[in-house]
Image (cartoon, helix red, strand yellow):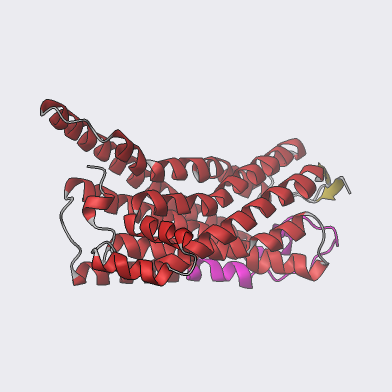
Amino acid sequence: MANVTATPANGTRCSRDYQTTQVLFPLLYTVLFFIGLITNSLAMRIFFQIHSKSNFIIFLKNTVISDLLMILTFPFKIFSDAELVTGWLRTFVCQVTSVIFYFTMYISISFLGLITIDRYQKTTSPFKTSSPNNLLGAKVLSIIIWAFMFLLSLPNMILTNQRPKDKNVKKCSFLKSEFGLVWHEIVNYICQVIFWINFLIIVVCYTLITKELYRSYVRTRGVGKVPRKKVNVKVFIIIAVFFICFVPFHFARIPYTLSQTRDVFDCSAENTLFYVKESTLWLTSLNACLDPFIYFFLCKSFKNSLISMFRCPNSVTSAAQVNRKKRQNSCEPSEETPM
């Protein structure tokens, strides 16, 4: 079915061509699902052989858990978008898996911000080690982030409680109660604040990191040493992932949310916002496949364990033991810092 009639907020009928979203996006999400499931399962297996002896490792472990949860929602979106599900499963997608998807997205964004702060600290103080109090603080902060996002997201599940009037309903907003629409809009604004706070953190920290790297470049050039340019590039993988995956979606999200909850756009504008939202949403999903590159390039113990595992498939545990003996199991500052 290529053309489906949707009912916007003003109650009028609006025709929309779903052919692209029924074929192209399910295929794209299928690719992400298999790649992301393999890479993140592997990352989790390796990380939980490594002791949490630095804030960096704690934040990375939380990120990989968040990414795996997001990836597990992909099959539901694939079947829903491809119209291979019954009405009750479409309701489940709107009520549960879509909420989990956004829940994990903002957890990942929050931890990318914390990882960036940690990288800045390692750049300015490369030999400073994490104290037990700092590690406890990182763990408590991680729990607070998960709890806050859960409490923010739970009402979206509870308030998606309306029976669909049309079996071909496409928009999850049609399944929300009146207050559910209000809460959905409030949550979107809160999530925008979360994004922009982390956006500013990342931009400011990387501006300072760049200045520090330039000073280091001048110093090394002055003593006749060759600057370690490839290491400098590695540290910028975080900001690259952030801008590729999250920035486009957040420029599109507010107008799309308004098109769902208020009568402010005509039919043509609603359709355009829908396709822009779906395209940029796929980019946010790509984050789950790009985060393992952060682990590989910025955490030497992860990299060593991964290489050892491929050399000997059953050697993850022994590789971790070797890393511990070499005191690499916490991603030591000398291995992580771009300096």
In the picture shown, does residue 182 fall above or below 321? above
| Figure quadrant of the C terminus | top left
In the picture shown, does residue 305 fall above or below 240? below
Q: Position of residue 103 (x, y in %)?
A: 53, 62
- Tell me, yes or no, whether the highlighted magenta stretch contains residue 160: yes
Q: Position of residue 318 (x, y in %)?
A: 37, 70
Front in this rendered view, residue 46 or 212: 46
Which residue is painted at 25% across and 68% down in the image?
Answer: 325
Q: Answer left or right for 147 relative to 91.
A: left
Write down the quadrant of residue 338 in the picture. top left
Q: Can I make out residue 71 in this image? A: yes
Front in this rendered view, residue 152 or 135: 135
Q: Which residues are magenta?
A: 150-179
Front in this rendered view, residue 10 or 102: 102
Which residue is painted at 13% across and 27% down in the image?
Answer: 224
- Tell me, yes or no, whether the highlighted magenta stretch contains residue 163: yes
